[in-house]
Image (cartoon, rainbow, N blue to C red):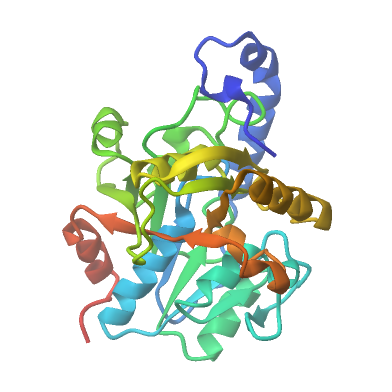
Amino acid sequence: MKPPLFWYQPNSLIALLLSPLGAIYAAATARRVKQKPTFKASVPVICIGNINAGGTGKTPTAIALAQRLTDLGHAPHIVSRGYGGSEVGPVQVDPATQTALDVGDEPLMLSAFAPTWVSKDRAQGVQSAQAAGATVILLDDGFQNPSVNKDLQIVVVDAVKGFGNGPTMPAGPLREPASAGLIRADAILAIGPEAARTKFSPLLPQGCARLDGQLDPLPTGMPWGNLPVLAFAGIGHPEKFFATLKSLGADVVRSEALDDHQPFTDALLTRLEGEAKAYGLNLVTTEKDAVRLPDHFRAKVMVLPVRLSLMDWGPLDAKLAAIGINQK
């Protein structure tokens, strides 16, 4: 589902009319997060979550943190609910035998960087990762899920979108009021261009570290300058992907914004390929979308990967050290 425009517009009448439903949603979330955890792992558990509904940059954050932990000499495992996949789990993701229809696109992508587990029951997923030798576990999402005790909680925010118009769903883009979520956060990571990060300045509770980062295209040697492309993306905010392509000099003749995690039907792929051929365009998509493409179609599409760059790892390294994660 594409987020409605009024979520990012102040003083919207639609948001006002939906505010009673938003209050009910917020109350339900508040009750849920007050529940006691049912499982505490014997290794550190780091939650990478958000207060907004989707599209904040959790997946690039999980990749960056997994690589950081690996560089520090640890064995991180990632646990995900596997949105969009049929597996109930707990099961370790195996790209050789599973597809996005089985485990979801994000776990399939994450499995290239660290052992990744899919489990609808997060506590069972954490137990499986721990039993398989994880020395630290990254929870991909789950900030509002109380089932697992979390040693460090990082809230990821798109600095451009911020907290939108402020209310909880369906009146706004939030899963819970920002003030309520930030109280539980150990760190907030604002991702976006410098100007947006500077403008985004929520009041943080004592002890909540401020982190800043941006998504940078991964150099692949591809000469994007003036390359005519038909870009398509089914992520939280496809417009960011199209803007990145343009910033590299690509000639984005046409762009197709799909729903987040949208399946690629034969009809959709046939249409995209036909349009590209008719106008002499190159098909290009995101790394997350690419793992959902059928094998026979992947060779027809170029991929532009992005990676998270933190402006300063110092505050996060201090948080990691506080829970016993240091250089081995």
Q: Residue at x 67, y 39 (%)?
A: 28
Residue that lies at the very extreme toward the right in this rendered image: 267
- The image shows residue 61, relative to residue 258, as above or below, that is below
Give whichever of 166, 115 is nearer the camera: 115
Side of 155 relative to 276 (left or right): left
Give whichever of 4, 244 is nearer the camera: 244
Q: Residue at x 57, y 24 (%)?
A: 7
Q: Residue at x 63, y 68 (%)?
A: 298
Residue 306 appears at what percent x and percent y? 40, 58
Give whichever of 55, 237 is nearer the camera: 237
**Residue 201 in sight from this viewpoint:** no
- The image shows residue 69, relative to residue 202, as above or below, that is below
Side of 59 relative to 104 (left or right): left
Side of 13 relative to 304 (left or right): right
**Residue 297 in sight from this viewpoint:** yes
- The image shows residue 51, relative to residue 265, as above or below, that is above
Q: Quadrant of the C terminus?
A: bottom left
Residue 60 appears at what percent x and percent y? 42, 59
Question: How many numbered marks appear?
Answer: 0
Side of 228 relative to 75 (left or right): right
Residue 121 appears at what percent x and percent y? 68, 68
Q: Residue at x 70, y 39 (%)?
A: 1
Q: Image quadrant of residue 132?
A: bottom right
